[in-house]
């Protein structure tokens, strides 16, 4: 599935809910479904700067694609990072670096998060894009 198709799927999933309380519950459930990051990757190097909660993000580069695992000590934040990982994991660094991330706006998330959570979400996206650029640059220099 492409990055765009994954975003469209999330948008479609959120359209099932009318109330934001139901959407928050869905975000929490997504966090519970997030594959667990291995404990060895819960290090200071993998903490995303700019998040109020602790968020760990680890990238693996396999067969030309980036795969992300993540975790958070806050349930909503864990759901947010789950969506970001779901959309961007399993793609090439170029696809990730070039991706237009629109699902956040389309589901109205930016209007329903506290400023600190919004900043944290942007920090997650920025960190993933930085991984993509770094791996893309590495591949070009080989």
Image (cartoon, grey):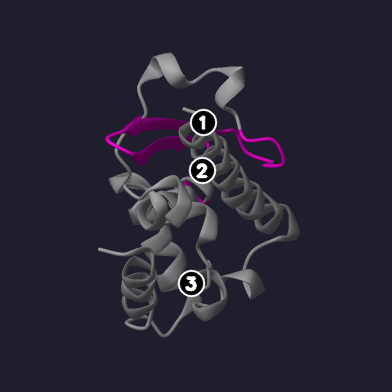
Left or right of 49? Residue 63 is left
Tag 1 secondary structure: helix
The mark found on residue 67 in the picture is none
Q: Position of residue 101 (x, y in %)?
A: 53, 66
Reply above or below: 79 against 46.
below
Q: Nearer the viewer, residue 22 or 62?
A: 62
Q: Secondary structure at mark 3?
A: helix
Mark earlier in primary sequence (1, 3): 3
Q: Position of residue 21 (x, y in %)?
A: 47, 71
Q: Secondary structure at mark 2?
A: helix
Q: Name the residue that disc number 3 marks.
A: 103
Q: Residues within 10 Å of mark 2 (few under 14, many from 20)?
A: many
Gap between marks 3 and 2 measured at Cα:
19 Å
Q: Nearer the viewer, residue 35 or 85?
A: 85
* Residue 132's disc number: 2
Which residues, given as a range, are shown in magenta? 48-76
Sequence-wise, the earlier of marks 3 and 2 is 3
- Describe residue 115's horizontal placement relative to residue 42 as left or right: right
| Residue at the spot 46% in from the left edge and 64% down from the top edge | 24
x 31%, y 64%: residue: 2
Which of the two discs, 3 and 2, sits closer to the camera?
Answer: 2
Residue under label 1, please give it.
138
Pick the quarter of the image with the N terminus: bottom left
**Label 3: how many residues lie within 10 Å, few (<14), some (14-19) or many (20+)?**
many
């Amino acid at each position: 599935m492409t990055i765009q198709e994954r975003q469209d799927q999330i948008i479609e999933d959120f359209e099932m809910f009318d109330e934001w309380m139901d959407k928050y519950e869905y975000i929490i459930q997504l966090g519970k479904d997030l594959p667990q990051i291995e404990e060895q990757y819960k290090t200071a190097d993998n903490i995303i700067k700019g998040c109020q909660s602790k968020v760990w993000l680890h990238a693996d580069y396999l067969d030309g694609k980036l795969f992300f695992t993540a975790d958070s000590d806050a349930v909503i934040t864990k759901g947010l990072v789950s969506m970001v990982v779901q959309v961007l994991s399993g793609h090439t660094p170029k696809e990730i670096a070039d991706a237009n991330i629109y699902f956040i706006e389309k589901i109205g998330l930016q209007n329903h998060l506290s400023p600190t959570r919004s900043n944290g979400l942007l920090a997650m996206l920025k960190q993933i894009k930085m991984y993509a650029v770094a791996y893309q640059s590495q591949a070009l220099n080989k």
